[in-house]
């Protein structure tokens, strides 16, 4: 096979006037044909990448004078791309539209680990900001030298260095003459004064939005390469089942190119996508599998978690001024609308995977361990996928595609999971139990607090250990999966109260649960904040205090107090009719990131089994806001997604199998229920940027539960709320 | 096993295409893989999520459960066929940009198709009618409140 080049791709696809935009900017057909972006080759790029302390690791100037930024992070739908454009453009006095962004690629970009934990702004955006500032200084130096003038007579504007006094200007490209800025980024690099910002801190629209509304190829799911074959995998019917046999007649079905069998890993490669699906369906019906281990029967999460994880610490000694409560949440799915997808090609011992993974470098290490290929023979290129919300099937489908491509060298193989593969095999957010007890002092303030939580792990990501990948566990020579090694990682997030309490004890208990689990947006914080903020309302009632004032009474962080006060002001005139209720929740995510206070107004009718969140409000302080509308969008989405988890979501299973296999058996919030939203951003340009994408989840859960209590007097402590209210 | 391929004529975005496919193939795969129209997305293949929607005779239809044979001779319009010949966006597309009514954007195809279908039949829908029109469209990023705003904005303009 010839190496796959973009040029060939464009010619082959003919009527596709624009090629698939893999690299975050949109070269025209002419440019691409001229080879400026021609990088669909399986060869590794020439030479080592610049080190992350060099400007050109992060930023390059293109021939047309525009700027290309390389980030080691991924666009997950969280708006990373536009924020990166804004910070780079700002330092260079150049419109964000003239900055293109290359997403994580082991062949091109720095290693920034995984895109998770709401850390992209705190890390990648700040790295890019510093690199762009260093680039500005270097460009000014070069221009000053070229013109023989003082640097202070120069300024940057729209991709040019200009002389203040005269009309003269030089474009970045003309200054560099094809070279890149390989100088180091000084540790003490001075950044543009924030009072001179033109783009940062404003609602700059996302550059991909127009492509989305025009239906252009944008996602990994839309990627097409010449000679590409389509694949599907056939998973065991239940966890742990082993393949015993399959009907070889399936090999003769139309379009089938190869059936790949390796132990209990089974997949089909076909010429056309629908042929692959038909062969997959045939194999599902005509393959034999052994029984997997039985799943436990769970009727109550609090009981199950306690039985499995052991007793907690002694609750606060019971008395007149004490309160005690137990909360829980079930397993919840990520539920991306687009099932996981990857394209892989294997040729001459080299493997290239295009993936919507959150971490190209960690996935490369893990694929290396699974396949035995050296890391330098594997390249993983990040391409945006459907919304992510944590560790979903992206890494697993990349591993599946790698195995299929290696068994079918010479042609790219595209694998998209079916809906059922995603629902049944993605790693869920763990079920949890939270137990709280507290005592109020004579002044009505909390003087003693005991908190216990029980959970499975919240991080089972592939950081090099092949056993973390589904496929690797089912190979003829399987990789073991060691669950206990990871403990509750991330489960204790936000379990320490942010409130000032003289005597507070927090303890966590590991439970090895029955279902596959890993990171789901906000990890343990969602359930911990749900429990703590529900309990705060219960305590406030006991103390005879207003729920928000009670919180403020226990806070000594002015910024926390301010978001709560703002929320109180924002919602003070909201009319509340009979059958309706308002509820509130607050948290500082991770106790170190964004401050977020949420209010929910719900309508409850117990007889008619109606529960509707009518509107949700949030006030968020994420320090310096890079893109105010992006921050609002994330917070609105966080509230609606959390409303869905809280009201109705629960992965169902019986002893035989997981029963949540599609959107009927695992439904999520629909338009008849989705609340209106309103978000106020407290922008603090003088403060560091704080992660914000996961701040609303926990406060939203508590806000809804507290609103339900206000509306109908029923306190729901076991999620989902609808089940607790209506059975 | 015999392949049962047929030549079929499809009318998509004002053009007529002759394609060859198994007549049972869901329209979605033909649009994406043979005609290079990437607006409609695979989400569930079960008609449950709406990401594959196209307009057929102006009505929003799930293309993942409709066979290409059944779509023959119909007037099919996809997301990329909504803009004018000069590239001018349809008012609903423009409203989605104005409201930034997406995050990951995977469901956006279905949202815009459902909105166009609604506004064609009911140019001034009330809140309940609007919500009902999107009842088969799932969004996981939680952009429903923005999608409703964008639809209201488009309704005001038309």
Image (cartoon, grey):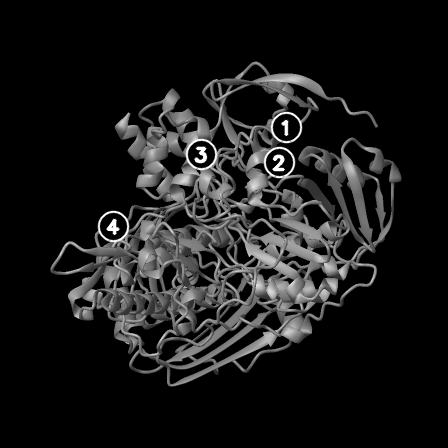
Q: CA distance from mark 2 to mark 1?
A: 9 Å
Residue at mark 4 to residue at mark 3: CA–CA distance: 27 Å
Quadrant (top left/top right/bottom left/bottom right) for the N terminus of chain A? top right
Residue at the spot x=43%, y=58% of the render? A701
Placement of A493 over or under A92, stated as above or below: below
In percent of the image, x 45 and y 30: which residue is there? B80
Q: How would you rate the neighbour count of disc 3 (Cα within 10 Å): few for under 14, some for 14-19, many for 20 or more?
A: many
Which chain does tag 1 point to?
B
* Residue holding disc 2: B45
C-alpha gap between disc 4 and disc 1: 48 Å
Q: Position of residue A235 (x, y in %)?
A: 74, 49
Horizontal and vertical percent position of residue A500: 35, 80
Q: Secondary structure at mark 3?
A: loop
Dot 2 or dot 3: first in sequence order is: 2
Q: Residues within 10 Å of mark 4 (few under 14, many from 20)?
A: few
Instruction: Name which of mark 3 and mark 1 comes first in the sequence.
Output: 1
Label 1 Cα neighbours within 10 Å, binned few <14 / some 14-19 / many ≥20: many
Circle nearer the viewer, 2 or 3: 2
Q: Residue placed at 63% from the left, 39% from the top?
A: A226
Query: Which mark, residue B26?
Result: 1
Residue A574's disc is: 4
Left or right for A443, reference A475 = left
Task: Compute the Cα span from label 4 to label 2.
Answer: 42 Å
**Which is more foreground, mark 4 or mark 3?**
3
The chain letter under disc 3 is: B
Looking at the image, is mark 2 or mark 1 nearer the viewer? 1
The image shows residue A550 at horizontal and vertical percentages of: 30, 71
Number of the label disc, if any, that sits on residue B134: 3
Same subunit under labels 4 and 1? no
* Mark in front: 4 vs 2: 2
The verdict on a common chain for dots 2 and 3 is: yes
């Amino acid at each position: 096979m010839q190496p796959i080049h973009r040029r060939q791709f464009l010619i082959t696809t003919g009527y596709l006037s624009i090629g698939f935009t893999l690299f975050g900017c949109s070269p025209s057909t002419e440019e691409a044909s001229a080879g400026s972006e021609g990088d669909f080759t399986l060869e590794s790029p020439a030479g080592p990448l610049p080190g992350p302390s060099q400007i050109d690791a992060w930023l390059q100037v293109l021939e047309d004078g525009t700027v290309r930024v390389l980030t080691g992070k991924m666009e997950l739908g969280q708006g990373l791309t536009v924020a990166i454009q804004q910070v780079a453009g700002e330092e260079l006095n150049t419109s964000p539209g003239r900055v293109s962004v290359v997403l994580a690629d082991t062949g091109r970009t720095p290693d920034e680990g995984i895109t998770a934990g709401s850390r992209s702004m705190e890390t990648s955006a700040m790295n890019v900001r510093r690199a762009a500032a260093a680039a500005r200084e270097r460009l000014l130096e070069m221009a000053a030298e070229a013109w023989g003038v003082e640097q202070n007579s120069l300024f940057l504007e729209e991709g040019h260095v200009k002389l203040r006094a005269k009309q003269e200007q030089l474009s970045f490209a003309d200054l560099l003459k094809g070279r890149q800025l390989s100088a180091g980024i000084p540790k003490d690099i001075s950044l543009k004064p924030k009072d001179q910002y033109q783009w940062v801190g404003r609602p700059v629209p996302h550059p991909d939005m127009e492509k989305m509304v025009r239906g252009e190829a944008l996602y990994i799911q839309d990627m097409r390469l010449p000679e590409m074959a389509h694949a599907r995998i056939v998973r065991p019917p239940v966890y742990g089942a082993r393949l015993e046999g399959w009907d070889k007649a399936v090999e003769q079905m139309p379009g089938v190119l190869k059936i790949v069998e390796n132990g209990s890993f089974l997949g089909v490669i076909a010429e056309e996508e629908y042929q692959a699906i038909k062969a997959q369906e045939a194999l599902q019906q005509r393959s034999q599998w052994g029984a997997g281990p039985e799943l436990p029967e769970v009727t109550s999460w609090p009981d199950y978690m306690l039985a499995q994880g052991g007793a907690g610490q002694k609750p606060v000694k019971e008395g007149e001024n004490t309160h005690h409560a137990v909360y829980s949440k079930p397993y919840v799915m990520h539920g991306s609308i687009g099932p996981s997808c990857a394209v892989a090609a294997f040729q001459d011992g080299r493997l290239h995977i295009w993936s919507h993974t959150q971490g190209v470098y960690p996935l490369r290490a893990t694929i290396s361990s699974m396949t035995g290929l050296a890391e330098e023979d594997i390249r993983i290129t990040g391409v945006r996928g459907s919304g992510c919300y944590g560790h979903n099937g992206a890494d697993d489908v990349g591993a599946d595609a790698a195995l299929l491509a290696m068994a079918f060298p010479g042609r790219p193989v595209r694998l998209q999971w079916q809906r059922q593969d995603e629902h049944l095999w993605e790693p869920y957010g763990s079920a949890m139990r939270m137990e709280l007890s507290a005592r109020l002092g004579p002044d009505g303030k909390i003087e003693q607090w005991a908190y216990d939580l029980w959970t499975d792990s919240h991080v089972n990501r592939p950081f090099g250990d092949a056993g973390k990948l589904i496929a690797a566990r089912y190979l003829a020579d399987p990789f073991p999966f060691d669950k206990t090694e990871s403990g509750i990682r991330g489960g204790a997030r936000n379990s320490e109260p942010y409130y000032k309490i003289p005597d507070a004890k927090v303890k966590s208990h590991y439970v090895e649960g029955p279902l596959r689990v890993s990171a789901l947006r906000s990890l343990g914080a969602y359930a911990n904040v749900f429990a703590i903020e529900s309990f705060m309302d219960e305590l406030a009632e006991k103390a005879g205090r207003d729920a928000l004032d009670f919180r403020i009474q226990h806070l000594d962080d002015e910024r926390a107090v301010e978001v709560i006060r703002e929320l109180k002001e924002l919602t003070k005139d909201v009319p509340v009719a009979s059958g309706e209720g308002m509820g509130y929740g607050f948290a500082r995510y991770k106790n170190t990131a964004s401050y977020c206070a949420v209010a929910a107004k719900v309508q409850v009718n117990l007889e008619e089994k109606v529960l509707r969140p009518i509107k949700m409000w949030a006030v968020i302080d994420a320090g310096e806001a890079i893109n105010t509308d992006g921050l609002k969008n994330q917070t609105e989405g966080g509230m609606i997604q959390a409303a869905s988890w809280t009201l109705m979501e629960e992965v169902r299973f019986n002893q035989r199998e997981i029963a949540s296999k599609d959107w009927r058996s695992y439904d999520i919030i629909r338009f008849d229920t989705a609340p209106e939203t309103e978000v106020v951003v407290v922008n603090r340009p003088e403060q560091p940027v704080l992660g914000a994408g996961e701040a609303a989840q926990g406060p939203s859960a508590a806000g809804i539960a507290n609103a339900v209590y206000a509306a109908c007097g029923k306190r729901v402590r076991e999620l989902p709320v609808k089940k607790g209210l209506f059975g | 096993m015999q392949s049962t391929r047929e030549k079929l004529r499809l009318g998509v975005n004002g053009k007529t295409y002759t394609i060859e496919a198994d007549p049972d193939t869901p329209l979605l795969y033909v649009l994406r893989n043979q005609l290079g129209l990437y607006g409609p997305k695979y989400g569930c293949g079960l008609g449950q999520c709406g990401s594959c929607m196209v307009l057929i005779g102006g009505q929003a239809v799930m293309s993942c459960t409709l066979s290409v044979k059944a779509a023959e001779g119909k007037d099919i319009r996809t997301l990329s066929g909504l803009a004018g010949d000069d590239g001018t966006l349809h008012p609903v597309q423009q409203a989605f940009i104005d409201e930034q009514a997406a995050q990951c954007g995977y469901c956006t195809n279905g949202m815009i198709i459902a909105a166009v279908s609604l506004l064609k039949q009911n140019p001034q829908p009330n809140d309940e009618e609007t919500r009902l029109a999107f009842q088969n469209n799932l969004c996981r990023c939680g952009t429903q409140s923005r999608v409703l705003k964008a639809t209201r904005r488009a309704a005001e303009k038309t």
